[in-house]
Each structure stands twice: as structure tokens, then as C-alpha cells.
Image (cartoon, rainbow, N blue to C red):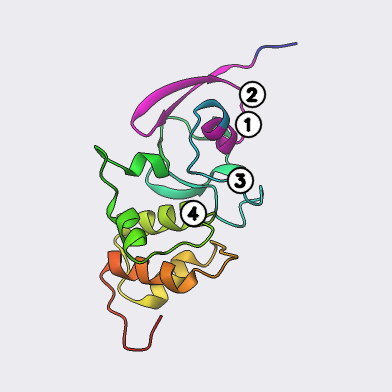
Amino acid sequence: MDEAPTIGLWVNGAWHEVAVPPGTALLHVLRNDLRLNGPKYGCGFGECGACTVLIGGRAARACCTPVSQVGALPVVTLEGLVKDGVLDEVQHAFVQEQAAQCGYCLNGMIMTVRALLDAGGARTLDEIKRALRFNLCRCGAHVEILRAACRVCGVVLEEGMP
């Protein structure tokens, strides 16, 4: 049996080398080899968003991204947003708005909003909804998630709006 090649990755500011087949999903490397629990396994098809990470500053689905395609681009997971024990502003907004029930979707929601901010943010609720449209939440925290995203983007909601 052939040995898997060693693949190097920048994850959360640190260099890691893993011996895995090139087609291995980045999600499996992050969770199994690097023991990072932020990205979740949801659907396995890139449809739900639970596995979202930032690759080169852009939101990407780790469940369907082969580790060999990452190359030298930096990968940031939910854990990598925390700096010196301080939550990222997006994480903080989600805490302030109590934007969780079961919490399974939060990784994808937070990482998608972080990518939105890094790309220039949003000026309207519709822009936020458009950015989050491919992130699924089954338990009903949608209103709080939208409020958290609006808070961090500086979008002021009208009275009676979610």
C-alpha cells in the first residue's frame, strides 16, 4: 500500500503538515488531523454551510474542498478568529444577539459574515440575506442571526424588523 503524501497547510496562522491522500476533504483534515471543531460536518455536499472556513480570505465549503486545492492559501477556522483570547467582532455580535439555539449552523453563519465584512460589508438587510442565503439553520435562530449580522455590519433595522 502506498503512503499518503505529506501536504502542508497554513491554518489559523500556523504551518501544519499532514499525510493524507490529495483528494481528502479539507474538513476531514481540520477536524480529524488538526482537531479543530469549529467547522461542522453537515451535508457533505457543500449545501448547508456548516463547514464554512475562510480560504485566502473567502468563504469556502471545507467538506467539498480537496486539501490539495488549498495550496499556500491561508485557512482560517472559527477558532482562528479569536485573537489573544478575545472574540472576533462577528463572534461578539452573535453572543450579544444570542444568535443560537442548537448552534450547529453558527460556524457557517459566523464565517460567512466574517467574509462579508472582509469583502467590504453590507449596507442593507437584503445584502446580508443574500450573503447568508446558502447557510441553512434548521432550529429557528434566523431572526437573531440576522440581527447579529446587522449589528456587526452597521445596518440599522427599522422598527418591527427582525
Q: How many marks?
A: 4
* Residue 27 is covered by the magenta coloring: yes
Which secondary structure lies at badge 3? loop
Residue corresponding to mark 3: 41
Determine which of the numbered discs, if any, sits on residue 148 in the image.
none
Residue span colored magenta: 4-31
Q: Are marks 4 and 1 in contact (CB under 8 Å)?
A: no
Q: Select label 4 or label 1 by which is in front.
A: 4
- Badge 4 element: helix
Which residue is painted at 38% across and 76% down in the image?
125
Instruction: Say which of marks 4 and 2 sits in front.
Output: 4
Q: Amino acid at mark 2?
A: Pro
Q: Which residue is mark 4?
A: 108
Q: Position of residue 121 (x, y in %)?
A: 31, 63
The reply, left or right, for residue 152 in relation to residue 39 is left
Q: Earlier in the sequence, mark 4 or mark 3?
A: 3
Q: Earlier in the sequence, mark 4 or mark 1?
A: 1
- Residue that numbered label 2 is attached to: 21
x then y, percent, for residue 48: 60, 57
Q: Is residue 109 above or below residue 72?
A: below
Residue at the extreme bottom: 159
Q: Which residue is mark 1?
A: 24
Q: Amino acid at mark 4?
A: Gly
Q: Residue at x 55, y 63 (%)?
A: 134
In the rendered image, residue 86, in percent from the top left (x then y), is placed at 25, 44
Q: Is residue 134 left or right of residue 120?
A: right
- Residue at mark 3 to residue at mark 2: CA–CA distance: 19 Å
Specify whether 105 is left or right of 157: right
Q: Position of residue 161 (x, y in %)?
A: 38, 84
Q: CA distance from mark 4 to mark 2?
A: 26 Å
- For the residues labelled 4 and 3, the Cα–Cα distance comes to 11 Å
